[in-house]
């Protein structure tokens, strides 16, 4: 049975008798040559990758955003064009970027050929553009797949002459697959740029043998935690109940919890940096390690 919520080949649907040519033309959306989908389906990076794979008729390797999506990376731009690597000269079409490359390491995922996770990470790291956004995507890729920065480093060592390879090591030094969302990555990078010791991610707190909480990031040594509260922390009743409980218990155990929302993170960065600095200094962080943390807010946003 053909799933019309997924991209499909029109010729295949007609040949198998699932659709008539008339119904295909009148009732479905044409994404690419011979690639269709049911009207009203929201586009995602994964959907665009599948459509590009069908368009290529299996000739090529999904790369870039498309490979990230197939490997399970979240938080990708749903409007971004799909990307595919093919041999020879193949003209790009609207919605699909076609590249040529040699020695591209690949694997098969869900019957589609894609760049390996290490190659995908390498391509992200050297892609250019905003450094913070690249690190967010790398964090998400590592979080989704278990990929380690050292695996990307090893891959980069085999491609030293590739375009953009020189900047990969610097980018990978800031990657942490523990971040569960782009705002968590943004928070971590902000605190590092502000001069604080690099925070640990996904800190588990126990009271004896009893699990109490898993915090987004923080410093065990000073018992300071930083938590990013997304919308679900306020709209999901069960999440709200858990939050009330743990934010009562953690201070009783000697932990300081700094809660961060979008406004504080993106518009009042100097306030966030000041709160973290005060908490760490009260907990014993020497001033010479955190001195000068409150810097120009515009610089902290870079």
Image (cartoon, rainbow, N blue to C red):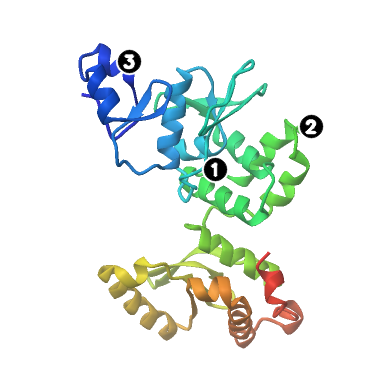
Secondary structure category for the residue under label 3: helix
Left-right relation of 4 to 289: left
The spot of residue 238 in percent (x, y) is 26, 69
Q: Are marks 2 and 3 in contact (CB under 8 Å)?
A: no
Which labelled disc corresponds to residue 90? none
Q: Secondary structure at mark 1?
A: loop
Q: CA distance from mark 1 to mark 2?
A: 23 Å
Q: Is residue 141 visible?
A: yes
User: Relative to 260, does residue 165 appear above or below in the rendering?
Assistant: above
Q: Is residue 50 above or below residue 77?
A: above
Q: Residue at x 62, y 86 (%)?
A: 278
Question: What residue would you read off at disc 3?
Answer: 11
Mark 1 and mark 2 residues within 8 Å of each other at the beta carbon: no
Q: Is residue 25 above or below residue 144?
A: above
Residue at the image position 63 percent from the left and 83 percent from the top:
274
Q: Looking at the image, which is closer to me, 143 or 301?
A: 301
Calculate the distance from the C-alpha at mark 3 to the C-alpha at mark 1.
38 Å
Q: Along the polypeptide, which appears first: circle 1 or circle 2?
A: 1
Q: Which residue is mark 2?
A: 161
Where does the image place residue 40, in percent across and percent down from the top left?
A: 30, 42
- The residue closer to the viewer here, 39 or 137, is 39
Q: Which label is found at residue 147? A: 1
Decide which of tag 3 and tag 1 comes sooner along the chain.
Answer: 3
Q: Nearer the viewer, mark 3 or mark 1?
A: 3
For the residues bearing labels 3 and 1, Cβ distance under 8 angstroms? no
For residue 181, side relative to residue 301 (left or right)? left
Q: Residue at x 52, y 63 (%)?
A: 184
């Amino acid at each position: 049975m053909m799933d019309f919520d997924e991209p499909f080949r029109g010729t295949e649907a007609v040949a198998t008798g699932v659709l008539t040519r008339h119904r295909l033309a009148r009732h479905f959306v044409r994404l690419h040559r011979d690639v269709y989908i049911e009207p009203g389906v929201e586009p995602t990076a994964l959907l665009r990758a599948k459509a590009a794979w069908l368009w290529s008729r299996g000739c090529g390797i999904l790369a870039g955003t498309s490979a990230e999506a197939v490997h399970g990376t979240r938080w990708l731009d749903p409007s971004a064009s799909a990307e595919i690597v093919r041999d020879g000269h193949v003209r790009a079409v609207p919605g699909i970027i076609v590249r040529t490359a040699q020695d591209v390491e690949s694997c098969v995922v869900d019957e589609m050929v894609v760049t390996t996770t290490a190659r995908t990470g390498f391509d992200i790291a050297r892609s250019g553009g905003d450094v913070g956004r690249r690190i967010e995507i790398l964090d998400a890729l590592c979080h989704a797949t278990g990929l380690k920065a050292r695996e990307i480093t090893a891959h980069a060592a085999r491609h030293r002459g590739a375009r953009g390879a020189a900047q990969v090591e610097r980018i990978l030094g800031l990657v942490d697959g523990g971040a569960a969302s782009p705002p968590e990555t943004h928070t971590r990078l902000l605190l590092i740029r502000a001069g604080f010791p690099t925070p640990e991610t996904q800190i588990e707190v126990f009271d004896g043998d009893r699990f109490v909480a898993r915090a987004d990031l923080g410093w065990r040594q000073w018992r300071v935690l930083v938590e990013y509260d997304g919308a679900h922390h306020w709209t999901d009743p069960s999440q709200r109940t858990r939050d009330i409980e743990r934010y009562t218990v953690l201070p009783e155990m000697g932990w300081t919890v700094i809660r961060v929302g979008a406004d504080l993170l993106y518009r009042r960065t100097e306030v966030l940096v000041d709160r973290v600095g005060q908490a760490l200094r009260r907990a014993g962080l020497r001033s010479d390690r955190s001195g000068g943390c409150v810097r120009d807010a515009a610089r902290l946003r870079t």
